[in-house]
Amino acid sequence: MDIDKILSIKNKDFLVALDKLISSSSSELEFVEIFNEQKSMLEMSERDINDGKLISQEAMDKRNLEWLNAK
């Protein structure tokens, strides 16, 4: 998030709501159980990253549009 965007907000109600959101999320630590299948998927993703098997968001967006237009 760009801090300049936050600093430029003038709407007090919005800032108060944002403060409450940030305060509540940072004060409550939440633990999520990860199942073996999810852990395996995360490990596979980590290997892909380490092996350089990546695609940019722009390329993925283009691929998705082509797929949608083909239907």
Image: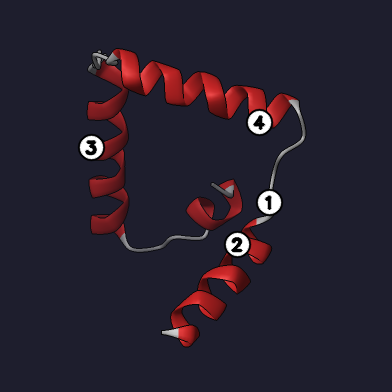
- Which numbered tag is attached to residue 60? 2
- Type of amino acid at the residue the image marks with label 4: Asp
Left or right relative to 63: residue 20: left
Pick the residue in front: 68 or 61: 68
Kindly identify which residue carries mark 3: 20
Image x and y of residue 61, in percent: 57, 68
**Residue 63 in the image, given as x and y percentages of width and height:** 59, 69
Residue topped by disc 1:
55
Which mark lies nearer to you, 1 or 3? 1
Q: Quadrant of residue 44 in the image?
A: top right
Determine whether the residue tagged by mark 4 lies in a helix, strand or loop.
Answer: helix
- The earlier-in-sequence mark between 1 and 3 is 3
Is there a contact, CB below 8 Å, between mark 3 and mark 2? no
Q: Residue at x 73, y 24 (%)?
A: 50
4 or 2: tag closer to the N-terminus:
4
Badge 1: how crowded within 10 Å, few (<14), some, or many (20+)? few
Callouts 1 and 2 close, C-beta under 8 Å = yes
Q: Amino acid at mark 2?
A: Met
Q: Looking at the image, is 7 positioned above or below residue 24?
A: below
- Element class at badge 1: loop
Q: Residue at x 33, y 20 (%)?
A: 37
The residue drawn where x is 68% and y is 51% is 55
Q: Quadrant of residue 66?
A: bottom right
Three-letter amino acid code of the residue under disc 3:
Lys
